[in-house]
Image (tube, grey):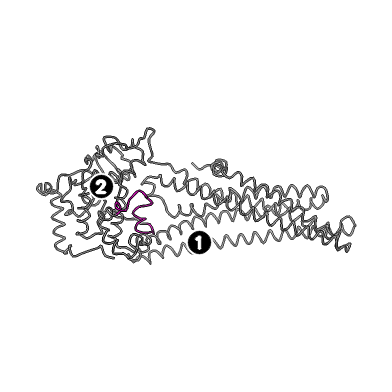
Amino acid sequence: MVPNTKQALSRLWPFMRRHLLQYTLLLLCLILKIGFVLFLPYITQMIVDNAILRRDLGALFKYSALMLSMFTFEGCIGVFADYITTHTGKKIASDVRIQCLVQLDKQSGKYHSEANSGDILATLFSDMSAVESLSTAIPFGFLSNMLTILAVIAYFSIRQWELLLYTLLAQPIILLIQRYFQKKIIARSESLRDTYGRLTSLLDDRITNGMGQLLAKANNFFFKKYIPTEEKVVQEAVRVEATNSLSSASMGFLSTLVNVGILGIGGLKIIEGTLSLGGLMAFSSYAQRLISPILGLSRVHMQFRQNMVSLKRVLKILDISVDIEDGIDAQDMNSVSYDIAFDRVSFAYTENTHILNDLNLCLHSGSICALVGKSGCGKSTITNLLYRLWDVNRGRILIGGQDIRTYKLSALRENIGIVSQDVYLFSDTIENNILLGREDITEEGLSNILRSAGLEEFVVSLPLGLKTQVGEKGIKLSGGQCQRISIARALAMDAKILILDEATSALDNHTEKKIMQEIQNNHGDKTVIVITHRLSSLRYMDRIFVLENGGVLESGRFDELLEKKGEFYAMYHKKKRIGTQINLPSMKSDVV
């Protein structure tokens, strides 16, 4: 449900009320600045009437010094107010952006698989300017303009009501023309923002997958989509700027007409002797101070409408419903056994595509088990469900005899370490990518982790060792080296359940066997689940589950399954035959 304006602003208030002191200082600065702005035309009148026309050098020096000091003081107040406004607005936008990221972090795999990253990035960056404006510039802009208008009208009413009447009569025409342009600007700005979101999505895909697109020779395909979108952005941006320029020129012309009228009426009054030259200059300045705030109110209204649209997009992220969250009585996983059981589990990503059908599976605590089968049989889905990226459609997943939905989500995920085929590394050092900020791991512990992940010799060979930068997404390393760092990261978490989902696919056979041997020898009480297509590495598994059509077709130890001469036997000999044909042992992917 899209919130209305009042509801949207009320959602922003909790972030704003943390800065009440800053708002109080801004209000004080605003009042002082308006006072100076309104007093300056009067000083101009004094300089002309009491100093210049009377040829009084002393008065000229006195009033000029007063004006200079007021300009200086006003400037200092303006700088101070701008600093507070910028700092407060940026801080509020930062708080809202962090809250959006926290909300995104709570989302399920379903949301992340369907979300448009370009739209999210556009909201987290472009639309955050709306949060800044709505929390500082717009409310204080409204107050400043309104107070200035009221003060000038009060002054005109006392001194020159005829000039006030003339100035006010011109305002409806000015406002109608400005309103016409505002509608055009808002509509075109919205169209530009939507197109820019699509452009951002294309660029994000290009930059994050640049190497992949290059290898796939997909450049032409990319530019066929990108160039028309870029051209549309340019076209719509030009239209927005042209409309802005035309609006500014129109307002400038009408303001000039008002000033010419004031000079004409004021000139007649000077000739009649009812108004001084200094008074005319002051009234002309006051008239401008009346026109500008009225136009300013109209601009603030336009900005308010534009920014409310952006704010509602931000709130859409904050209001994303969380599919998977803790139950009312969710508990920690203290002192539980880590036996894992899938009890008649059925699951489908979409209604008509069933991945698991009445799956029954039991993994004993402290065991090393493997899941094998053809692509699409549900191996990685089991990982997703165990980690609760998705929830089962039917049945239960149990750990320690309890449904995993009864555990706190944070506690469940803290006890599960996953190494997938798709490795993500930060643009940082090897050490930081492994530890992720943990400070409780000793040098000896880290050394053991490096040895278990097959990284020890590689790290020693590097001039900077663990301080070596891996580059963005590990671009400076081979696929196998990235996977070994990912395995080390999972081992450093010391999770009770370790899942290796094609975690050694980029490693050569020798390195893979060495790592698996280390894990088998040192896994302690961890429950280890291995998902792989390399069946030869499963010889020492406690149990192997062969999946087909969303269920367990057969299970047993390596030798037992070969003796059965079932599906595992067929898969093993097929891969062995293919490996012999293409001389697999000579192919090594773990090279820099």
Is 466 rendered above or below residue 376? below
Q: Is residue 395 visible?
A: no
Mark 2 = which residue?
Answer: 378
Residue 131 falls within the magenta-colored stretch: no
Q: Amino acid at mark 2?
A: Gly
Where residue 5 sits, quadrant-wise, is top right
Q: Nearer the viewer, mark 2 or mark 1?
A: 2
Say what amino acid the circle numbered 1 marks.
Val
From where the camera sits, is residue 386 visible? Answer: yes
Q: Which mark is residue 179?
A: none
Horizontal arrangement in the rendering, residue 457 relative to residue 209 (left or right): left
Residue 443 lies, in percent from the top left, at 32, 53
**Along the line of sight, the residue nearer the viewer: 370 or 528:** 528
- Counting from the top left corner in percent of width and height, residue 274 is at 89, 55
Q: Earlier in the sequence, mark 2 or mark 1?
A: 1
On the rendered image, what quadrant is the C terminus found in? bottom left
Q: Secondary structure at mark 1?
A: helix
Q: Which region shows up in magenta? A: 426-446
Indicate the position of residue 350 as horizontal and vertical percent values.
32, 45
Q: Do the residues under discs 2 and 1 have CB atoms within 8 angstroms?
A: no
Q: Residue at x 36, y 35 (%)?
A: 330
Label 1, on which residue? 233
Distance from the alpha carbon under mark 2 to that under mark 1: 43 Å
**Residue 63 point in image, percent of width and height:** 81, 59
Label 2 SS: loop
